[in-house]
Image (tube, grey):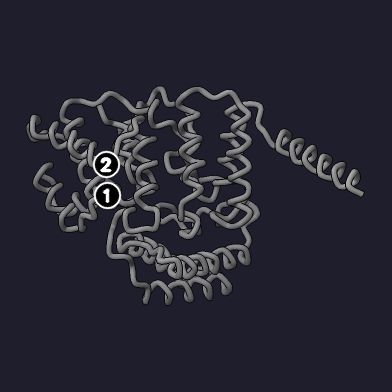
C-alpha cells in the first residue's frame, strides 16, 4: 500500500512538472503576445478580434499568472527580467480587488470585439461591485480621485446599453453614489500599501532606496535648480501615463505592462532637457508626497503650482497622473 502511495505521489509530481514545462514560452515575444491577448480589454488599440479574459476575473488572474510563469523559461535580458519580477511581485497586492482600472474604458473596448457578449459584460460589472464590497470589508477602498473617474465612466454608459448591462450599470451606479472613499490619496492608504509603493520605486528607479532617502536627495537637487520653462502636454484622458510622452518615438523597446502599452520604460525613455529634468524631479517629489507622506490633494496642488508655475487645472491633471501611475516618474531619476 505504501509503495502504491509513493508511486502515485511521484506520478503526480511528474505530471505537474510536465504541465509547467509545456506552459512555458520559447521566446520573450511569444510571452508578451500572450499577455496582450489576456489584457486585450485593457488595450488602447481600436480593433480587437476576440475577448480572452475579463479584467481581474478568476480566469484572467489564472491566465496572467501562468503567462508570467511561462516567461520565466525564456531568455530575458536584465531589463526584461526586472520588469517580469516587478509584475510578479504586484500579484501579492490588492490590485485584484479593483476590477475596473479607471484608466481604461473596458465597456467601449468590449463592444469592439467579435465575440462581444452582453451577458458576460453584465456579469463582469457585477464582479466589479462584488470585489469592491469585498475590498471594503478588508479596509481597502478607492481614493476620491479613483472613485470620481470610475463613477464618471459608469455614468457615461448609462442609457446606452442593453437591458442586462443597463441593470448592472444602474446597480453599480447606485453603489458608487453612496461609496465612501479612503481619505488618503496615495498607496500608503491601502493595506501593505507602503510595501507595494516600495516595489514600484525599486523597479522604476532601478535602485533600492527607502522613500525618505529619495525625498532627501530630490529636494537637495531641487534647491540647486532654477524654475524651468517648459510646455506641459496634458490631455483629457489618463489612458496612458504622462511618462510615455517622453519616450523615444523612433526606437521603442517592447515590454510586458499593459499600463505602458507593452513598452519597456527604462529602455524607451528619451534623454531629457535640463528643464524637463527639473519638471520630473518636481513630479517625483510630489509622487513621494502623495504615496508615502500622505499629502492631501490641496498640499500637492499648492506644491506643483509653486514649483512649476502651472495653473490649478494643470496641477490637478498632474495629481491624477501621479495617483494612477505611482512611482513611474522615477524612470527619469539621474
Residue occupying image coordinates x 8% and y 30%: 224
User: In this rendering, would 84 be left or right of 269?
Assistant: right
Q: Mark 2 points at which residue?
A: 211
> In terms of secondary structure, where does tag 2 sit?
helix
* Badge 1 or badge 2: first in the primary sequence: 2
User: In this rendering, would 302 be left or right of 48?
Assistant: left
Vertical comparison of 67 with 82: above or below:
below
Residue occupying image coordinates x 11% and y 42%: 307
Vertical comparison of 290 with 165: above or below:
above
Badge number at residue 143? none
Q: Are marks 1 and 2 in contact (CB under 8 Å)?
A: yes
Q: Where is residue 151 in the image (x, y as percent from the top left)?
A: 38, 66
Graded by Cα atoms within 10 Å as few (under 14), some (14 to 19) or many (20 or more), the crowding at tag 2 reads many
Residue occupying image coordinates x 63% and y 42%: 66
Q: Where is residue 239 in the image (x, y as percent from the top left)?
A: 39, 48
Marks 1 and 2, how far apart in space?
Answer: 7 Å
Vertical comparison of 78 with 316: above or below:
above
Vertical comparison of 97 with 317: above or below:
below
Q: Position of residue 102 (x, y in %)?
A: 40, 56
108 and 321: which is toward the camera: 321
Residue occupying image coordinates x 88% and y 47%: 2
> In terms of secondary structure, where does tag 1 sit?
loop
**Residue 181 in view here:** yes
Amino acid at each position: 500500500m505504501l509503495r502504491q502511495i509513493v508511486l502515485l505521489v511521484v506520478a503526480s509530481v511528474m505530471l505537474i512538472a510536465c504541465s509547467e514545462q509545456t506552459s512555458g514560452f520559447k521566446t520573450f515575444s511569444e510571452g508578451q503576445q500572450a499577455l496582450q491577448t489576456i489584457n486585450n480589454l485593457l488595450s488602447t488599440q481600436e480593433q480587437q478580434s476576440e475577448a480572452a479574459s475579463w479584467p481581474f476575473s478568476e480566469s484572467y488572474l489564472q491566465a496572467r499568472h501562468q503567462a508570467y510563469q511561462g516567461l520565466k523559461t525564456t531568455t530575458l535580458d536584465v531589463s526584461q527580467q526586472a520588469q517580469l519580477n516587478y509584475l510578479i511581485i504586484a500579484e501579492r497586492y490588492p490590485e485584484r480587488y479593483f476590477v475596473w482600472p479607471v484608466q481604461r474604458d473596458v465597456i467601449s473596448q468590449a463592444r469592439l470585439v467579435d465575440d462581444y457578449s452582453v451577458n458576460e459584460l453584465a456579469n463582469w460589472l457585477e464582479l466589479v461591485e462584488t470585489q469592491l464590497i469585498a475590498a471594503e470589508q478588508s479596509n481597502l477602498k478607492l481614493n476620491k480621485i479613483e472613485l470620481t473617474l470610475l463613477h464618471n465612466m459608469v455614468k457615461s454608459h448609462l442609457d446606452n446599453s442593453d437591458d442586462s448591462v443597463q441593470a448592472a450599470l444602474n446597480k453599480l451606479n447606485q453603489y458608487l453614489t453612496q461609496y465612501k472613499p479612503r481619505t488618503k490619496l496615495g498607496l500608503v492608504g491601502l493595506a501593505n500599501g507602503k510595501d507595494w509603493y516600495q516595489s514600484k520605486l525599486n523597479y522604476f528607479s532601478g535602485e533600492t532606496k527607502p522613500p525618505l532617502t529619495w525625498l532627501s536627495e530630490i529636494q537637495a537637487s531641487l534647491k540647486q535648480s532654477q524654475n524651468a520653462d517648459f510646455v506641459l502636454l496634458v490631455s483629457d484622458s489618463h489612458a496612458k501615463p504622462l511618462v510615455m510622452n517622453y519616450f523615444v518615438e523612433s526606437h521603442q523597446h517592447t515590454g510586458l505592462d499593459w499600463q505602458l502599452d507593452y513598452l519597456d520604460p527604462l529602455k524607451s525613455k528619451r534623454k531629457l532637457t535640463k528643464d524637463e529634468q527639473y519638471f520630473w524631479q518636481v513630479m517625483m517629489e510630489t509622487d513621494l508626497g502623495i504615496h508615502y507622506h500622505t499629502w492631501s490633494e490641496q498640499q500637492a496642488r499648492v506644491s506643483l503650482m509653486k514649483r512649476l508655475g502651472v495653473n490649478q487645472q494643470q496641477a490637478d491633471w498632474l495629481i491624477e497622473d501621479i495617483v494612477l501611475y505611482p512611482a513611474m516618474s522615477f524612470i527619469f531619476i539621474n
